[in-house]
Amino acid sequence: LDPEEFRRQGHMIIDFLADYYLNIEKYPVLSQVEPGYLRKRLPESTPYNPESIETILQDVQDHILPGVTHWQSPSYFAYFPSSGSIAGFLGEMLSTGFNVVGFNWISSPAATELESIVMDWLGEMLQLPKSFLFSGNGGGVLQGTTCEAILCTLVAARDQMLRRIGSQNMGKLVVYGSDQTHCSLQKAARIAGINPSNFRAIKTTKSTTFSLSPDSLRSAICKDIDAGLIPLFLCATVGTTSTTAIDPLRSLCDVAKDYGLWVHVDAAYAGSVCICPEFRHVIDGVEGANSFSLNAHKWFLTTLDCCCLWVKDPSALVKSLSTNPEYLRNKATDSRQVVDYKDWQLTLSRRFRSLKLWFVLRSYGVAKLRDFLRSHVNMAKLFEGFVTSDKRFEIVVPRSFAVVCFRVLSPRMDNGVAYAKRTTNGHTNGHLNGHTNGHSNGHLNGHTNGHLNGHTNGKGDDHDHDDHNYMKEESTNELNRKLLESINKAGRVFMTHSMVGGVFVIRFAVGATLVEEKHVITAWKVVQEHANAILSENY
Ligand code: PLP
Protein backbone atom coordinates (compact mmCIF):
# COMPACT_ATOMS: atom_id res chain seq x y z
CA LEU A 1 0.00 0.00 0.00
CA ASP A 2 1.92 2.98 -1.30
CA PRO A 3 0.76 6.09 0.61
CA GLU A 4 1.24 8.45 -2.34
CA GLU A 5 -0.66 6.19 -4.71
CA PHE A 6 -3.35 5.86 -2.04
CA ARG A 7 -3.56 9.68 -1.90
CA ARG A 8 -3.85 9.95 -5.71
CA GLN A 9 -6.48 7.25 -6.09
CA GLY A 10 -8.31 8.35 -2.95
CA HIS A 11 -8.70 11.86 -4.34
CA MET A 12 -10.04 10.40 -7.58
CA ILE A 13 -12.69 8.47 -5.70
CA ILE A 14 -13.71 11.52 -3.67
CA ASP A 15 -13.94 13.55 -6.89
CA PHE A 16 -15.98 10.79 -8.48
CA LEU A 17 -18.39 10.76 -5.55
CA ALA A 18 -18.60 14.56 -5.36
CA ASP A 19 -19.57 14.59 -9.06
CA TYR A 20 -22.05 11.79 -8.39
CA TYR A 21 -23.75 13.92 -5.75
CA LEU A 22 -23.67 16.98 -8.02
CA ASN A 23 -25.46 15.02 -10.73
CA ILE A 24 -27.55 12.67 -8.64
CA GLU A 25 -30.83 14.18 -9.81
CA LYS A 26 -30.04 13.24 -13.41
CA TYR A 27 -30.31 9.52 -12.72
CA PRO A 28 -33.62 7.61 -12.58
CA VAL A 29 -34.15 7.11 -8.83
CA LEU A 30 -35.16 3.48 -9.23
CA SER A 31 -32.70 1.58 -11.39
CA GLN A 32 -34.34 0.68 -14.69
CA VAL A 33 -32.16 -2.31 -15.63
CA GLU A 34 -33.45 -5.83 -16.27
CA PRO A 35 -32.38 -8.83 -14.17
CA GLY A 36 -29.04 -10.25 -15.31
CA TYR A 37 -28.03 -7.00 -17.04
CA LEU A 38 -24.52 -6.92 -15.54
CA ARG A 39 -23.33 -10.37 -16.56
CA LYS A 40 -23.93 -9.37 -20.17
CA ARG A 41 -21.70 -6.33 -19.75
CA LEU A 42 -18.75 -7.57 -17.71
CA PRO A 43 -15.99 -10.00 -18.73
CA GLU A 44 -16.52 -13.63 -17.83
CA SER A 45 -13.55 -13.90 -15.49
CA THR A 46 -11.10 -11.95 -13.35
CA PRO A 47 -8.45 -10.06 -15.36
CA TYR A 48 -5.08 -11.80 -15.30
CA ASN A 49 -3.13 -8.53 -15.40
CA PRO A 50 -3.77 -5.50 -13.16
CA GLU A 51 -6.07 -2.79 -14.45
CA SER A 52 -5.80 0.92 -13.69
CA ILE A 53 -8.11 2.77 -11.35
CA GLU A 54 -9.09 4.98 -14.29
CA THR A 55 -10.36 1.95 -16.27
CA ILE A 56 -12.18 0.53 -13.27
CA LEU A 57 -13.86 3.86 -12.44
CA GLN A 58 -14.97 4.24 -16.05
CA ASP A 59 -16.70 0.86 -15.74
CA VAL A 60 -18.34 2.00 -12.51
CA GLN A 61 -19.73 4.96 -14.42
CA ASP A 62 -20.81 2.95 -17.45
CA HIS A 63 -21.97 -0.34 -15.97
CA ILE A 64 -22.46 -0.10 -12.23
CA LEU A 65 -24.30 3.22 -11.96
CA PRO A 66 -27.13 2.15 -14.31
CA GLY A 67 -27.85 -0.69 -11.89
CA VAL A 68 -27.81 1.50 -8.79
CA THR A 69 -31.04 2.61 -7.17
CA HIS A 70 -30.20 6.04 -5.83
CA TRP A 71 -31.02 5.92 -2.14
CA GLN A 72 -29.28 9.26 -1.64
CA SER A 73 -31.36 11.01 -4.30
CA PRO A 74 -33.53 13.83 -2.93
CA SER A 75 -36.42 12.22 -4.82
CA TYR A 76 -36.02 8.91 -2.99
CA PHE A 77 -39.12 8.32 -0.83
CA ALA A 78 -39.10 4.51 -0.65
CA TYR A 79 -38.90 1.98 2.23
CA PHE A 80 -37.17 3.86 5.04
CA PRO A 81 -34.34 6.29 4.33
CA SER A 82 -30.66 5.46 4.45
CA SER A 83 -29.51 8.95 5.23
CA GLY A 84 -25.86 9.71 4.57
CA SER A 85 -23.83 12.77 5.47
CA ILE A 86 -20.32 14.10 4.95
CA ALA A 87 -19.59 13.29 8.60
CA GLY A 88 -20.93 9.75 8.26
CA PHE A 89 -19.05 9.05 5.02
CA LEU A 90 -15.78 10.42 6.32
CA GLY A 91 -16.07 8.56 9.61
CA GLU A 92 -16.68 5.41 7.61
CA MET A 93 -13.68 6.16 5.44
CA LEU A 94 -11.47 6.60 8.47
CA SER A 95 -12.71 3.37 9.95
CA THR A 96 -12.02 1.52 6.71
CA GLY A 97 -8.66 3.26 6.44
CA PHE A 98 -7.55 2.08 9.87
CA ASN A 99 -9.12 -1.30 9.13
CA VAL A 100 -8.77 -2.57 12.68
CA VAL A 101 -10.59 -5.65 13.86
CA GLY A 102 -11.79 -4.65 17.32
CA PHE A 103 -13.12 -7.92 18.68
CA ASN A 104 -11.75 -7.34 22.16
CA TRP A 105 -10.37 -4.35 24.04
CA ILE A 106 -6.70 -5.09 23.41
CA SER A 107 -7.23 -5.56 19.66
CA SER A 108 -7.86 -1.79 19.45
CA PRO A 109 -8.68 -0.06 22.74
CA ALA A 110 -9.98 3.11 21.05
CA ALA A 111 -12.52 1.11 19.05
CA THR A 112 -14.01 -0.38 22.19
CA GLU A 113 -13.83 2.71 24.37
CA LEU A 114 -15.21 5.11 21.76
CA GLU A 115 -18.11 2.72 21.17
CA SER A 116 -19.02 2.64 24.85
CA ILE A 117 -18.77 6.44 25.04
CA VAL A 118 -20.94 7.19 22.00
CA MET A 119 -23.52 4.66 23.14
CA ASP A 120 -23.79 6.49 26.45
CA TRP A 121 -23.93 9.87 24.66
CA LEU A 122 -26.70 8.74 22.33
CA GLY A 123 -28.53 6.95 25.13
CA GLU A 124 -28.55 10.19 27.10
CA MET A 125 -29.79 12.14 24.06
CA LEU A 126 -32.71 9.70 23.88
CA GLN A 127 -33.24 10.00 27.64
CA LEU A 128 -32.97 6.26 27.98
CA PRO A 129 -33.15 5.20 31.62
CA LYS A 130 -29.73 5.09 33.27
CA SER A 131 -30.12 1.33 33.62
CA PHE A 132 -29.44 1.04 29.85
CA LEU A 133 -26.18 2.99 30.05
CA PHE A 134 -22.71 1.90 31.12
CA SER A 135 -22.93 4.51 33.85
CA GLY A 136 -25.93 2.57 35.21
CA ASN A 137 -24.56 -0.99 34.79
CA GLY A 138 -26.26 -1.54 31.45
CA GLY A 139 -24.58 -0.75 28.18
CA GLY A 140 -24.69 -0.28 24.44
CA VAL A 141 -23.13 -1.99 21.45
CA LEU A 142 -23.02 -1.18 17.75
CA GLN A 143 -24.13 -4.08 15.63
CA GLY A 144 -24.66 -4.27 11.89
CA THR A 145 -28.44 -4.53 11.69
CA THR A 146 -31.59 -4.86 13.75
CA CYS A 147 -31.86 -8.50 12.61
CA GLU A 148 -28.65 -9.22 14.51
CA ALA A 149 -29.73 -7.19 17.53
CA ILE A 150 -33.03 -9.05 17.83
CA LEU A 151 -31.34 -12.41 17.39
CA CYS A 152 -28.73 -11.64 20.07
CA THR A 153 -31.31 -10.45 22.59
CA LEU A 154 -33.60 -13.37 21.86
CA VAL A 155 -30.77 -15.84 22.37
CA ALA A 156 -29.83 -14.10 25.64
CA ALA A 157 -33.45 -14.27 26.81
CA ARG A 158 -33.77 -17.92 25.74
CA ASP A 159 -30.65 -19.03 27.60
CA GLN A 160 -31.58 -17.04 30.70
CA MET A 161 -34.94 -18.81 30.75
CA LEU A 162 -33.49 -22.25 30.02
CA ARG A 163 -31.02 -21.86 32.88
CA ARG A 164 -34.07 -21.53 35.10
CA ILE A 165 -36.43 -24.10 33.63
CA GLY A 166 -34.05 -26.59 32.04
CA SER A 167 -33.21 -27.11 28.38
CA GLN A 168 -35.70 -29.97 28.10
CA ASN A 169 -38.36 -27.20 27.96
CA MET A 170 -36.93 -25.50 24.88
CA GLY A 171 -39.85 -26.64 22.72
CA LYS A 172 -42.30 -24.82 24.99
CA LEU A 173 -40.85 -21.31 24.62
CA VAL A 174 -43.11 -18.76 22.92
CA VAL A 175 -42.14 -15.54 21.12
CA TYR A 176 -44.61 -12.67 20.65
CA GLY A 177 -44.89 -9.75 18.26
CA SER A 178 -47.72 -8.30 16.24
CA ASP A 179 -48.69 -8.89 12.63
CA GLN A 180 -46.89 -5.59 11.99
CA THR A 181 -43.60 -6.58 13.64
CA HIS A 182 -40.66 -6.66 11.25
CA CYS A 183 -39.98 -10.08 9.74
CA SER A 184 -36.57 -10.09 11.45
CA LEU A 185 -38.30 -11.34 14.62
CA GLN A 186 -39.57 -14.42 12.84
CA LYS A 187 -36.18 -15.03 11.31
CA ALA A 188 -34.49 -14.64 14.69
CA ALA A 189 -36.99 -17.03 16.30
CA ARG A 190 -36.28 -19.61 13.61
CA ILE A 191 -32.51 -19.30 14.03
CA ALA A 192 -32.81 -19.37 17.83
CA GLY A 193 -34.59 -22.72 17.60
CA ILE A 194 -38.03 -21.56 18.73
CA ASN A 195 -40.65 -24.08 17.68
CA PRO A 196 -42.26 -22.46 14.59
CA SER A 197 -45.72 -23.16 15.98
CA ASN A 198 -44.79 -21.07 19.06
CA PHE A 199 -44.35 -17.84 17.12
CA ARG A 200 -47.21 -15.40 17.71
CA ALA A 201 -47.91 -12.54 15.31
CA ILE A 202 -50.81 -11.01 17.23
CA LYS A 203 -53.43 -9.42 15.02
CA THR A 204 -53.71 -5.63 14.96
CA THR A 205 -56.54 -3.59 13.53
CA LYS A 206 -57.13 -0.25 11.95
CA SER A 207 -59.15 0.84 14.99
CA THR A 208 -55.95 0.82 17.06
CA THR A 209 -53.93 2.16 14.13
CA PHE A 210 -52.18 -1.19 13.80
CA SER A 211 -50.47 -1.02 17.17
CA LEU A 212 -50.28 -4.07 19.42
CA SER A 213 -53.02 -4.13 22.03
CA PRO A 214 -51.89 -5.04 25.57
CA ASP A 215 -55.18 -6.90 26.07
CA SER A 216 -54.54 -9.02 22.99
CA LEU A 217 -51.05 -9.74 24.26
CA ARG A 218 -52.37 -10.80 27.66
CA SER A 219 -55.00 -13.07 26.09
CA ALA A 220 -52.40 -14.71 23.85
CA ILE A 221 -50.06 -15.26 26.80
CA CYS A 222 -52.83 -16.72 28.99
CA LYS A 223 -53.91 -19.04 26.21
CA ASP A 224 -50.35 -20.28 25.81
CA ILE A 225 -49.89 -20.78 29.55
CA ASP A 226 -53.15 -22.74 29.65
CA ALA A 227 -51.77 -24.92 26.88
CA GLY A 228 -48.65 -25.66 28.95
CA LEU A 229 -46.35 -23.35 26.98
CA ILE A 230 -43.84 -20.85 28.39
CA PRO A 231 -43.95 -17.18 27.27
CA LEU A 232 -40.41 -15.97 26.62
CA PHE A 233 -39.97 -12.84 24.54
CA LEU A 234 -41.93 -9.86 23.27
CA CYS A 235 -40.71 -7.61 20.48
CA ALA A 236 -42.57 -4.29 20.68
CA THR A 237 -42.12 -1.84 17.82
CA VAL A 238 -41.99 1.93 17.82
CA GLY A 239 -42.46 2.87 14.17
CA THR A 240 -43.54 -0.28 12.35
CA THR A 241 -42.26 -0.88 8.86
CA SER A 242 -45.58 -0.69 7.03
CA THR A 243 -47.21 2.32 8.66
CA THR A 244 -44.92 3.51 11.50
CA ALA A 245 -47.43 2.34 14.11
CA ILE A 246 -46.39 2.76 17.74
CA ASP A 247 -46.86 -0.11 20.18
CA PRO A 248 -47.77 1.20 23.67
CA LEU A 249 -44.60 0.34 25.56
CA ARG A 250 -45.68 1.06 29.10
CA SER A 251 -48.75 -1.16 29.10
CA LEU A 252 -47.07 -3.87 27.05
CA CYS A 253 -44.14 -3.95 29.48
CA ASP A 254 -46.61 -4.16 32.38
CA VAL A 255 -48.22 -7.24 30.83
CA ALA A 256 -44.84 -8.77 30.03
CA LYS A 257 -43.67 -8.21 33.60
CA ASP A 258 -46.65 -10.13 34.97
CA TYR A 259 -45.48 -13.22 33.05
CA GLY A 260 -41.71 -12.74 33.12
CA LEU A 261 -41.10 -12.04 29.43
CA TRP A 262 -38.00 -10.33 28.06
CA VAL A 263 -39.11 -7.20 26.17
CA HIS A 264 -37.11 -5.90 23.25
CA VAL A 265 -38.08 -2.53 21.76
CA ASP A 266 -37.44 -2.29 18.04
CA ALA A 267 -37.26 1.40 17.18
CA ALA A 268 -35.21 0.80 14.02
CA TYR A 269 -36.71 3.74 12.14
CA ALA A 270 -38.40 5.99 14.68
CA GLY A 271 -35.87 5.74 17.49
CA SER A 272 -33.78 8.55 16.00
CA VAL A 273 -36.54 11.13 16.19
CA CYS A 274 -36.89 10.50 19.93
CA ILE A 275 -33.97 12.89 20.45
CA CYS A 276 -36.57 15.62 19.80
CA PRO A 277 -38.42 16.32 23.06
CA GLU A 278 -41.78 16.49 21.27
CA PHE A 279 -41.38 12.87 20.10
CA ARG A 280 -39.77 11.36 23.18
CA HIS A 281 -43.16 10.30 24.56
CA VAL A 282 -43.40 7.52 21.98
CA ILE A 283 -40.85 5.55 23.98
CA ASP A 284 -42.32 6.38 27.39
CA GLY A 285 -42.36 3.16 29.34
CA VAL A 286 -39.08 1.92 27.82
CA GLU A 287 -37.79 1.63 31.39
CA GLY A 288 -39.86 -1.56 31.64
CA ALA A 289 -38.04 -3.16 28.68
CA ASN A 290 -34.89 -5.28 28.73
CA SER A 291 -33.37 -4.03 25.50
CA PHE A 292 -33.83 -1.26 22.96
CA SER A 293 -32.45 -0.76 19.47
CA LEU A 294 -32.48 1.76 16.65
CA ASN A 295 -30.77 1.93 13.28
CA ALA A 296 -28.57 5.02 13.01
CA HIS A 297 -28.17 4.01 9.37
CA LYS A 298 -31.82 4.71 8.70
CA TRP A 299 -32.63 8.25 9.79
CA PHE A 300 -29.57 9.50 11.64
CA LEU A 301 -27.08 10.52 8.95
CA THR A 302 -24.82 7.53 9.62
CA THR A 303 -23.85 5.18 6.81
CA LEU A 304 -24.95 1.58 6.71
CA ASP A 305 -24.43 -0.38 8.83
CA CYS A 306 -24.97 0.96 12.33
CA CYS A 307 -27.57 -0.59 14.62
CA CYS A 308 -27.43 0.78 18.17
CA LEU A 309 -28.47 -1.78 20.79
CA TRP A 310 -28.76 -1.06 24.51
CA VAL A 311 -29.32 -3.72 27.13
CA LYS A 312 -30.00 -3.47 30.83
CA ASP A 313 -28.12 -6.66 31.62
CA PRO A 314 -25.06 -7.07 29.41
CA SER A 315 -24.14 -10.23 31.32
CA ALA A 316 -27.15 -11.97 29.76
CA LEU A 317 -25.68 -11.32 26.30
CA VAL A 318 -22.20 -12.33 27.41
CA LYS A 319 -23.38 -15.59 28.95
CA SER A 320 -24.89 -16.61 25.61
CA LEU A 321 -22.38 -15.19 23.17
CA SER A 322 -18.93 -15.35 24.72
CA THR A 323 -16.13 -17.69 23.69
CA ASN A 324 -12.67 -17.53 25.20
CA PRO A 325 -10.12 -19.49 23.19
CA GLU A 326 -6.51 -19.45 24.36
CA TYR A 327 -5.35 -17.47 21.32
CA LEU A 328 -7.47 -14.50 22.41
CA ARG A 329 -6.44 -14.52 26.07
CA ASN A 330 -4.91 -11.31 27.39
CA LYS A 331 -4.39 -9.48 30.66
CA ALA A 332 -7.05 -6.85 30.06
CA THR A 333 -9.74 -9.48 29.52
CA ASP A 334 -8.56 -11.45 32.55
CA SER A 335 -8.73 -8.29 34.67
CA ARG A 336 -12.48 -8.01 33.87
CA GLN A 337 -11.98 -4.26 33.68
CA VAL A 338 -12.80 -3.99 29.98
CA VAL A 339 -15.61 -4.66 27.52
CA ASP A 340 -14.84 -7.31 24.90
CA TYR A 341 -17.53 -6.58 22.34
CA LYS A 342 -17.08 -9.95 20.59
CA ASP A 343 -19.14 -11.31 23.51
CA TRP A 344 -22.05 -8.92 22.86
CA GLN A 345 -22.72 -9.95 19.27
CA LEU A 346 -22.77 -12.77 16.72
CA THR A 347 -19.46 -12.30 14.98
CA LEU A 348 -15.96 -12.21 16.35
CA SER A 349 -14.42 -9.74 13.90
CA ARG A 350 -16.02 -6.34 14.05
CA ARG A 351 -15.62 -2.94 12.45
CA PHE A 352 -14.76 0.37 14.08
CA ARG A 353 -18.33 1.58 13.62
CA SER A 354 -18.32 4.09 16.45
CA LEU A 355 -16.07 6.47 14.48
CA LYS A 356 -18.78 7.37 12.00
CA LEU A 357 -21.42 7.81 14.69
CA TRP A 358 -19.00 9.96 16.74
CA PHE A 359 -18.33 12.10 13.65
CA VAL A 360 -22.08 12.54 13.12
CA LEU A 361 -22.81 13.40 16.75
CA ARG A 362 -19.98 15.95 16.86
CA SER A 363 -20.41 17.47 13.41
CA TYR A 364 -24.11 18.16 13.87
CA GLY A 365 -24.56 18.42 17.60
CA VAL A 366 -27.93 17.79 19.19
CA ALA A 367 -29.40 21.02 17.79
CA LYS A 368 -28.70 20.32 14.11
CA LEU A 369 -29.69 16.67 14.40
CA ARG A 370 -33.06 17.75 15.75
CA ASP A 371 -33.43 20.34 12.96
CA PHE A 372 -32.68 17.65 10.38
CA LEU A 373 -35.31 15.26 11.72
CA ARG A 374 -37.92 17.96 12.20
CA SER A 375 -37.45 19.25 8.67
CA HIS A 376 -38.41 15.80 7.37
CA VAL A 377 -41.46 15.61 9.59
CA ASN A 378 -42.53 19.02 8.27
CA MET A 379 -42.06 17.94 4.67
CA ALA A 380 -44.14 14.83 5.34
CA LYS A 381 -46.85 17.11 6.77
CA LEU A 382 -46.71 19.15 3.59
CA PHE A 383 -47.24 16.04 1.46
CA GLU A 384 -50.02 14.88 3.76
CA GLY A 385 -51.72 18.26 3.20
CA PHE A 386 -51.52 17.74 -0.57
CA VAL A 387 -53.12 14.31 -0.26
CA THR A 388 -55.96 15.49 1.95
CA SER A 389 -56.71 18.45 -0.29
CA ASP A 390 -57.27 16.24 -3.35
CA LYS A 391 -60.54 14.41 -2.84
CA ARG A 392 -59.53 11.58 -5.14
CA PHE A 393 -56.99 10.45 -2.52
CA GLU A 394 -57.04 9.47 1.12
CA ILE A 395 -54.63 9.09 3.99
CA VAL A 396 -55.01 5.43 4.92
CA VAL A 397 -53.55 5.59 8.43
CA PRO A 398 -52.60 8.60 10.52
CA ARG A 399 -49.07 9.89 10.05
CA SER A 400 -46.85 9.63 13.11
CA PHE A 401 -43.41 10.65 11.85
CA ALA A 402 -42.19 11.35 8.31
CA VAL A 403 -44.00 8.60 6.41
CA VAL A 404 -47.33 9.27 4.74
CA CYS A 405 -49.47 6.23 3.89
CA PHE A 406 -51.95 7.14 1.19
CA ARG A 407 -53.87 5.78 -1.74
CA VAL A 408 -55.98 6.92 -4.62
CA LEU A 409 -59.64 5.98 -4.35
CA SER A 410 -61.34 4.11 -7.08
CA PRO A 411 -64.15 6.17 -8.66
CA ARG A 412 -66.14 2.93 -8.61
CA MET A 413 -65.75 2.43 -4.88
CA ASP A 414 -69.13 3.90 -4.22
CA ASN A 415 -71.16 2.00 -6.80
CA GLY A 416 -70.10 4.43 -9.47
CA VAL A 417 -70.96 7.60 -7.53
CA ALA A 418 -68.44 10.25 -8.49
CA TYR A 419 -65.97 11.68 -5.97
CA ALA A 420 -67.73 15.02 -5.79
CA LYS A 421 -71.01 13.46 -4.73
CA ARG A 422 -69.39 11.60 -1.90
CA THR A 423 -68.90 14.84 -0.02
CA THR A 424 -72.48 14.44 1.15
CA ASN A 425 -71.53 11.37 3.20
CA GLY A 426 -72.15 12.34 6.78
CA HIS A 427 -69.80 9.96 8.59
CA THR A 428 -66.90 11.45 10.47
CA ASN A 429 -63.69 9.91 11.64
CA GLY A 430 -62.17 12.03 14.34
CA HIS A 431 -59.26 9.69 14.73
CA LEU A 432 -58.01 10.12 11.22
CA ASN A 433 -58.86 13.76 11.10
CA GLY A 434 -57.04 14.36 14.34
CA HIS A 435 -53.88 13.24 12.72
CA THR A 436 -54.13 14.92 9.39
CA ASN A 437 -53.22 18.44 10.33
CA GLY A 438 -56.76 19.37 11.05
CA HIS A 439 -57.85 19.27 7.40
CA SER A 440 -61.55 18.76 7.43
CA ASN A 441 -62.04 15.68 5.41
CA GLY A 442 -64.59 13.79 7.40
CA HIS A 443 -66.73 12.76 4.46
CA LEU A 444 -63.90 11.05 2.69
CA ASN A 445 -62.31 9.39 5.68
CA GLY A 446 -65.61 8.33 7.15
CA HIS A 447 -66.54 6.85 3.86
CA THR A 448 -63.44 4.77 3.33
CA ASN A 449 -63.15 3.74 6.94
CA GLY A 450 -66.53 2.16 6.56
CA HIS A 451 -65.17 0.11 3.74
CA LEU A 452 -62.12 -0.95 5.67
CA ASN A 453 -64.08 -2.01 8.70
CA GLY A 454 -66.49 -3.88 6.54
CA HIS A 455 -63.63 -5.78 5.04
CA THR A 456 -61.10 -6.23 7.82
CA ASN A 457 -63.46 -6.72 10.71
CA GLY A 458 -65.90 -8.78 8.73
CA LYS A 459 -68.80 -6.82 10.23
CA GLY A 460 -71.07 -7.01 7.22
CA ASP A 461 -74.48 -8.50 8.00
CA ASP A 462 -74.93 -10.26 4.75
CA HIS A 463 -72.39 -12.08 2.63
CA ASP A 464 -73.31 -10.23 -0.54
CA HIS A 465 -72.38 -6.95 1.12
CA ASP A 466 -69.05 -8.38 2.32
CA ASP A 467 -68.27 -9.82 -1.07
CA HIS A 468 -69.16 -6.53 -2.67
CA ASN A 469 -66.84 -4.59 -0.33
CA TYR A 470 -64.10 -7.10 -0.87
CA MET A 471 -64.35 -6.75 -4.64
CA LYS A 472 -64.25 -2.97 -4.32
CA GLU A 473 -61.14 -3.09 -2.10
CA GLU A 474 -59.46 -5.47 -4.50
CA SER A 475 -60.12 -3.17 -7.43
CA THR A 476 -58.83 -0.17 -5.46
CA ASN A 477 -55.75 -2.15 -4.52
CA GLU A 478 -55.17 -2.99 -8.16
CA LEU A 479 -55.56 0.65 -9.11
CA ASN A 480 -52.96 1.70 -6.55
CA ARG A 481 -50.60 -1.07 -7.58
CA LYS A 482 -50.79 0.22 -11.15
CA LEU A 483 -50.35 3.79 -10.01
CA LEU A 484 -47.21 2.99 -8.01
CA GLU A 485 -45.73 0.93 -10.81
CA SER A 486 -46.30 3.70 -13.28
CA ILE A 487 -44.79 6.34 -10.93
CA ASN A 488 -41.66 4.28 -10.27
CA LYS A 489 -41.16 3.28 -13.88
CA ALA A 490 -40.87 6.91 -14.86
CA GLY A 491 -37.83 7.16 -12.57
CA ARG A 492 -38.42 10.72 -11.32
CA VAL A 493 -39.29 9.59 -7.79
CA PHE A 494 -39.28 6.27 -5.98
CA MET A 495 -41.89 5.17 -3.44
CA THR A 496 -42.84 1.73 -2.16
CA HIS A 497 -45.96 0.08 -0.79
CA SER A 498 -47.32 -2.13 1.92
CA MET A 499 -50.56 -3.97 2.65
CA VAL A 500 -52.40 -3.21 5.88
CA GLY A 501 -55.77 -4.62 6.83
CA GLY A 502 -56.19 -5.83 3.25
CA VAL A 503 -55.50 -2.38 1.86
CA PHE A 504 -52.66 -1.57 -0.54
CA VAL A 505 -51.02 1.63 0.67
CA ILE A 506 -48.41 3.75 -1.03
CA ARG A 507 -45.77 4.83 1.48
CA PHE A 508 -44.19 8.24 1.01
CA ALA A 509 -41.15 8.23 3.31
CA VAL A 510 -39.32 11.54 3.64
CA GLY A 511 -35.77 11.04 4.88
CA ALA A 512 -33.13 11.52 2.19
CA THR A 513 -30.48 13.94 3.38
CA LEU A 514 -30.72 16.09 0.24
CA VAL A 515 -34.53 16.35 0.15
CA GLU A 516 -36.05 19.83 0.08
CA GLU A 517 -39.63 21.05 -0.09
CA LYS A 518 -39.36 21.47 -3.86
CA HIS A 519 -38.76 17.73 -4.23
CA VAL A 520 -41.85 16.95 -2.16
CA ILE A 521 -43.90 19.35 -4.28
CA THR A 522 -42.60 17.72 -7.47
CA ALA A 523 -43.28 14.26 -6.07
CA TRP A 524 -46.90 15.18 -5.46
CA LYS A 525 -47.19 16.54 -9.01
CA VAL A 526 -45.77 13.26 -10.31
CA VAL A 527 -48.36 11.33 -8.27
CA GLN A 528 -51.15 13.49 -9.64
CA GLU A 529 -49.96 13.22 -13.25
CA HIS A 530 -49.82 9.45 -13.09
CA ALA A 531 -53.14 9.26 -11.26
CA ASN A 532 -54.74 11.47 -13.94
CA ALA A 533 -53.45 9.19 -16.67
CA ILE A 534 -54.46 5.96 -14.98
CA LEU A 535 -57.88 7.18 -13.93
CA SER A 536 -58.67 8.48 -17.39
CA GLU A 537 -57.45 5.23 -18.98
CA ASN A 538 -59.39 2.97 -16.64
CA TYR A 539 -62.59 4.83 -15.82
N1 PLP B 1 -37.33 -3.33 12.35
C1 PLP B 1 -38.00 -2.39 11.68
C2 PLP B 1 -39.15 -1.70 12.34
C3 PLP B 1 -37.63 -2.07 10.37
O1 PLP B 1 -38.33 -1.17 9.70
C4 PLP B 1 -36.54 -2.72 9.78
C5 PLP B 1 -36.12 -2.41 8.42
O2 PLP B 1 -36.66 -1.59 7.75
C6 PLP B 1 -35.88 -3.70 10.52
C7 PLP B 1 -36.29 -3.98 11.81
C8 PLP B 1 -34.73 -4.48 9.95
O3 PLP B 1 -33.60 -3.71 10.04
P1 PLP B 1 -32.20 -4.30 9.58
O4 PLP B 1 -32.23 -4.27 8.10
O5 PLP B 1 -31.22 -3.35 10.16
O6 PLP B 1 -32.07 -5.67 10.12
Image (tube, helix red, strand yellow):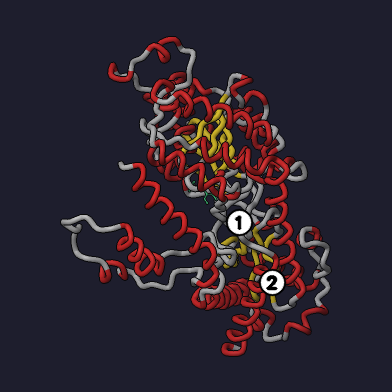
Q: Nearer the viewer, residue 101 or 122?
A: 101
Q: Which quadrant of the figure has residue 495?
A: bottom right
Residue located at (46% from left, 54% from top): 14
Relative to residue 488, is residue 209 drawn left or right?
right
Q: Is mark 2 within 8 Å of ligand 1?
A: no
Residue located at (62% from left, 39% from top): 361
Q: Is residue 190 visible?
A: yes
Give x and y (percent) for residue 135. Answer: 62, 20
Q: Nearer the viewer, residue 188 or 229?
A: 188
Look at label 2 and name its amino acid.
Ile
The numbered dot on residue 496 is none
Relative to residue 85, is residue 4 drawn left or right?
left
Q: Which quadrant of the figure has residue 16?
A: bottom left
Q: Nearer the viewer, residue 86 or 322?
A: 86
Give x and y (percent) for residue 479. Answer: 57, 78
Residue located at (76% from left, 61% from top): 432
Q: Point out the image quarter for the C terminus.
A: bottom right
Relative to residue 161, is residue 256 drawn left or right?
right
Residue located at (74% from left, 58% from top): 378
Instruction: Say which residue label 2 marks.
Output: 521
Of helix, strand and loop, which one carries label 2?
A: helix
Return the residue found at the far left.
Answer: 48
Instruction: Say which residue label 1 marks.
Output: 513
Give x and y (percent) for residue 500. Answer: 59, 61
* Few, some or many residues within 10 Å of mark 1 (<14, 14–19, 20+): many
Q: Is residue 436 above or below residue 342?
A: below
Q: Is residue 222 visible?
A: no
Give x and y (percent) for residue 478. Answer: 54, 76
